[in-house]
Image (cartoon, helix red, strand yellow):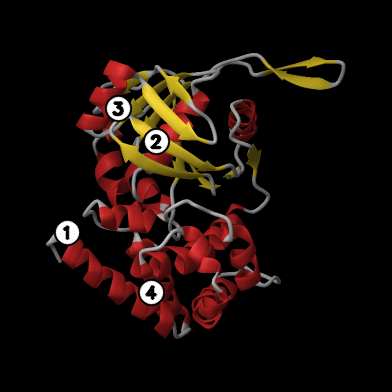
Amino acid sequence: MQPLLQKNKKVLIFSGTMDIIIFGAGAIGSLYGAKLSKLNEVTLIGRKEHIGKINKHGLRITGLENKRYHLNALTGIEKIGKDTLIVLTTKAQDSKKAISSIKHLVRKDTTILCLQNGLYSENAVKSIIKNKCLVLRAVTNFGAAFLNPGAVKYNSYSYTAIEKSKKSREIALNFRQCGLNGYVSKNIRQDMWKKLVLNCVLNPITSILRVENKLISDRRLDALKELVAGECIAVAKKDGIIFEFDFVKEINSTFKNSTNTSSMLQDLMKGRKTEIGYLNGAVAELGRKYGVKCPANEALTKLIKEIEVQCTGTS
């Protein structure tokens, strides 16, 4: 990573680039790769068909913008250069396999930014990488949907909260300059838990009902939302994170106009495994450790796993 800032009349100006690998170019990964290519050398790593279309026609982004991006795209990481930032955007359940495949390539000056859903999902990466390089957690609420190979819809603008470290300010400023609203989080665990509570309500309920995100704002669902969020908040409190606002009100307000489809429903529609084990399932598991009962989250986990069997044909 090159020097980033210079001062001009007390205004901080971006003046450098990064070598960035987006590891897991699905909807969010592709969107981040496209936006980051504004100032950086970006390489997307993804599935063969998607990568093939990008190499042939470029990456098409629709929705909040309509643009075609031409950037490097590969199906695997062959080498990692000096000071490379790896933005990990695979599904949480795929982290171990993904990181194990590049462990031998990782350098001391590599930074891995885990931009994923899930409760402490970055720990799977840390367990493999050990102290070989810096591993950071990041949280985002940008909305994107995978349309077809080579095309992603940009549905909603949000933020990128990045865990504190000596490199985090540089990364955050770069992301901000690229339109990804990056900032260094004061408490990444609190950011993680807030996103987790939202996901534990939004993802399974919209997936079971097979509806767009805006339908989660239906007041007839408030009692169920309160049950799920309440259990999550109780476990978070035992984990040292306190929330003092109305999550149901926040959810109803945040998603009332959202035409995005939850990532869990997108996975089920494609016949793929979901992240339920890292969301509601993880909350229920941690709840058992802390002595907090989570029947609503356990029930949603079982329901989604049953739907997974029907959609994927595997248990």
Residue tagged by mark 4? Answer: 285
Tell me if 194 is positioned left or right of 308 in this view. right
Residue 116, image x, y percentages: 43, 48
Residue 199, image x, y percentages: 47, 62
**Residue 312 disc label:** 1
Residue 56, image x, y percentages: 27, 17
Q: Is mark 4 on a helix, strand or loop?
A: helix
- Amino acid type shown at disc 4: Glu
Q: Is mark 1 on a helix, strand or loop?
A: helix
**Residue visible at 51% across and 18% down in the picture:** 40
- Mark 2 or mark 1, which is nearer the start of the sequence? 2
**Which image quadrant: the C terminus?**
bottom left
- Mark 3 or mark 1, which is nearer the start of the sequence? 3
Above or below — where is 257 with respect to 164?
A: below
- Amino acid type shown at disc 3: Leu
Viewer-closest of 67 and 183: 67
Residue tagged by mark 2? Answer: 152
- Amino acid type shown at disc 1: Thr
Front of the two marks 1 and 4: 1
Above or below — where is 261 with respect to 132?
A: below
**Residue 105 disc label:** 3
